[in-house]
Amino acid sequence: MADSEALPSLAGDPVAVEALLRAVFGVVVDEAIQKGTSVSQKVCEWKEPEELKQLLDLELRSQGESQEQILERCRAVIRYSVKTGHPRFFNQLFSGLDPHALAGRIITESLNTSQYTYEIAPVFVLMEEEVLRKLRALVGWSSGDGIFCPGGSISNMYAVNLARYQRYPDCKQRGLRTLPPLALFTSKEVGKRHRPNPGLLILISSHVTTPSRRELRFWDLALTVSEWSRLMREGKWSPRIWRGRLVWPRLSLLSSWDYRPLATKPG
């Protein structure tokens, strides 16, 4: 049973806690929200790394600091950070400041719970189920499940993992060693940051050479798969041991003109 008394707060003084948080929220509203979304202000007060280190004084000390010092550090963090809510911020896939979403974030951060089970997060678990239901309805699904992902890279990795499981549903029981060699084909232009990590999924990653800089067209992929399959049939594509490590040969891609009967380019 938990003690009915309040947990120790800042210096044992709940009034001091409230005063600090109200002061910090005031800095956030003034600097991050009002100035950070004003077109008359900069998107970022840019400084080079070495200069910024000196301005911020990031040394970890064994002693605490006064409230005024803490507030000044809050101002400095906001001042030298990128204001993604600024009207002229166009660097990422998101921008703008939604006050309703910010209010929700304040609540979730204050409660500081996790969505593991209904027992630890009853409200948020129900909210999660409702959002997933709505997302499924948008694509025409009346049932199913879902998961929220923190970014595009891990979303791609989840997708590849689901594809592998769909093709080999017994991999969980039999293990990865019982599966045939699996290959992951991507366009050569796909950056490392956006490419699913084949090492985590025990896949072989291979680039597909395409005429277009950003397109991975069907006939390019079909030709690559055909070449990969041919090497497998002829026994020319198999792992070998080198210095105690399992090494996979690089997959050489032939010109698409060598396989015109399999996939013909349009036009």
Image: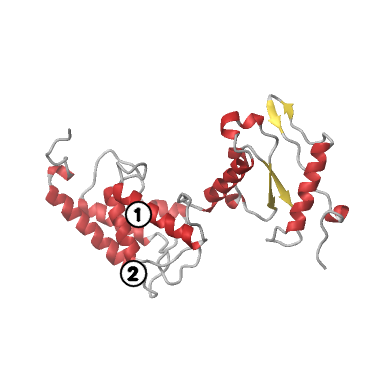
Q: Which structural element holds mark 1? A: helix
Q: Residue at x 28, y 38 (%)?
A: 62
Percent position (x, y) of residue 198? 62, 42
Left of 210 or right of it: where is 75?
left
Give above or below for 131 relative to 113: below
Q: Position of residue 205 (x, y in %)?
A: 68, 44
Q: x%, y% of residue 204?
A: 68, 40
Q: Residue 240 appears in which quarter of the rendering? A: top right
Considering every residue shown, the one lying at the far bottom of the view is 40
| Quadrant in which the N terminus appears | top left
Say above or below: 21 vs 170. below
What residue is drawn where x is 37% and y is 42%? 116
Q: Which mark is residue 127?
A: 1
Q: CA distance from mark 2 to mark 1?
A: 32 Å
Q: Is residue 197 visible?
A: no
Q: Which one is in front, 16 or 226?
A: 226
Which residue is found at the position 53% from the left and 48% from the top?
A: 154
Identify residue type, mark 1.
Met
Q: Amino acid at mark 2?
A: Lys
Percent of width and height locating residue 73 = 30, 54
Q: Work out whether residue 84 or residue 66 is closer to the camera in this orientation and state it.
A: 84
Of residue 136 and residue 87, the one placed in the foreground of this image is: 136
Mark 2 or mark 1, which has the lower sequence index? 2
Is 157 situated above or below 174?
below
Image quarter (top left, top right, bottom left or bottom right) of the C terminus: bottom right
Instruction: Point out the frontmost of discs 2 and 1.
Output: 1
Identity of the residue furthest to the top in this view: 244
Please state which of residues 128 and 154 is positioned toward the viewer in this rendering: 128
Q: Label 2: which residue?
A: 35
